[in-house]
Amino acid sequence: MDSQRDAMEQTVTSLDSPPQAVPGDTGAAGKQIPPAAVARLTIYLRALNTLMAEGTERVSSESLAEASGVSSSTLRKDLSHVGSYGTRGVGYEVQYLSRHIAAALGLTHDWKVAIVGAGNLGKALARYGGFESRGFDVVAIFDADQMVVGNEVGWLRVSDVADLEPVLERTGANMVVLALPAAVAQSVCDRVVAAGVHSILSFAPVMLQVPEGVNLRKVDMATELQILAYHAQRAQTPGQPE
Amino acid sequence: MDSQRDAMEQTVTSLDSPPQAVPGDTGAAGKQIPPAAVARLTIYLRALNTLMAEGTERVSSESLAEASGVSSSTLRKDLSHVGSYGTRGVGYEVQYLSRHIAAALGLTHDWKVAIVGAGNLGKALARYGGFESRGFDVVAIFDADQMVVGNEVGWLRVSDVADLEPVLERTGANMVVLALPAAVAQSVCDRVVAAGVHSILSFAPVMLQVPEGVNLRKVDMATELQILAYHAQRAQTPGQPE
DNA sequence: TAGATTGTTAATCGATTAACAATC
DNA sequence: TAGATTGTTAATCGATTAACAATC
């Protein structure tokens, strides 16, 4: 669903390179991880953190896969993109594996997130505990409505979207979440990109155009319901039940 | 990411069947549409509705594809799963195509959505205009907190989650959105399924287990940010810039 | 050593793309 | 008829799965 196709040329696979695996090293770092695998790695990471909270120290691919809702084959294949951090006959050390997946995903330092739009959704996101706990600091929230600017949301005060550029600069934000109406999303998006932020998560129900090199992801709640509707309809339809 | 693999056996493709295409007919209906295509059809639908609002009557695969951020090849392939509703040398009638995509997705009748969880996110969803305008009626919202039960949210009054089953029954809800903490998500999910609702959209950051035949989709905002983090990190990394 | 489980291979499956015959 | 654009094919590409050799 995104924009990486080219690359992937560099011959050398981990096969023919001499096995000089320094333990605790970079592993398979530097290689492209397939998009589908990246998405699942975040799931494994959450499952591992749950295990850690429960005090579990070791886990097999079989049980981690089950907790994550995938096959053990898929799990091991995905982990192979990160490196070789298991022990044959034994399994994976939970903490050790967790650390390496986090490193592969770029989660070793905190990311600073600015939210544009302090409506219901923007406020919900700003207060969402799940961000902080996973290394994402919400450092600013913006709105265009003068009645809302200056209000407190969580720990933050709502900034005027007119001050977008200086506030992004001052807070050092390196990710932006767009939680605003479709009509203004593209223009705000352009300003965010111009301000040098290249990672954007949009909740606006509109196709945003961004230049090459900008990472844009989109979450659309109505789309999700429509996809459910398709499957629900199929289930109802008489015809040959699958 | 979902649960349909089997099926897909029924030989006959639209090729060797005699071309008795009654106009305005069911088209390729009854056939499985690949998951990736279903997701994109919702995008085309939105683009078509935008065109309709602008008064545009006709569109080519080339320009609809551009508005949707896909290649025209992908677009035509996707539409072929729905049926043949274009005219060679001319293009597609916007309204006509829109109606047929909507029909294929099961959006011809309204769906009744209940939201469980009246926290920030639940309230944001309940008030989100994008649902109503696309055929999803929010018919109920629940919370477990007695301080919140009875409050007004949008047009609705918050019901006690203790009354989940009777209220789902009475309102005729056929979709449920879970906007509640990870800790209680599974148990509420089980009750929803037991109550006969088989289409669930979850915002809870946890892997839910559902029986065969239940359609579950998951949106996780922290996951989205983590995926962005991966790409951002790659872009920063020196190495060979792709 | 015997048992267990990883990491990798090769086969299968599905999705995307380019090209073009069909046809308005 | 000539020009345009669909719908479909076949080729390519990527993702998933099953199986097993490597090895703890």
Image: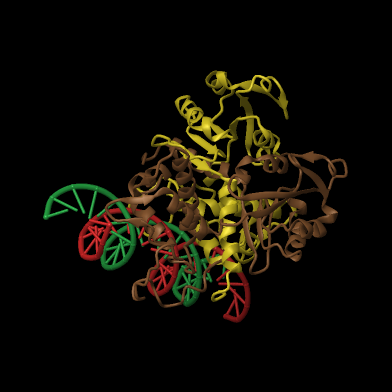
Chain colours: A brown, B yellow, C green, D red
Residue A154: % across, % down: 73, 39
Q: In which quarter of the view is residue D16 placed? A: bottom left
Taking the view exactly as shown, the residue that stands out farthest to the front is A23
Q: Nearer the viewer, residue B188 or D24?
A: D24
Q: Nearer the viewer, residue B62 or B29?
A: B62
Residue A106: % across, % down: 55, 59
Taking the view exactly as shown, the residue that stands out farthest to the right is A146
Residue B242: % across, % down: 55, 74
Image point 63% across, 38% down: which residue? B135
- Left or right position of A66 against B61: left
Residue A148: % across, % down: 84, 41
Q: Nearer the viewer, residue A96 or B220?
A: A96
- From this view, report whether residue B209 is shown above or below residue A164: above
Number of callouts in the render?
0
Q: Is any atom of residue B83 visible in this view?
A: no
Image point 63% across, 26% down: which residue? B140
Q: In which quarter of the view is residue B65 placed? A: bottom right
- Left or right position of B97 against A192: left
Image point 47% across, 73% down: which residue? A8
Q: In which quarter of the view is residue A20 placed? A: bottom left
Q: Is any atom of residue B188 visible in this view?
A: yes
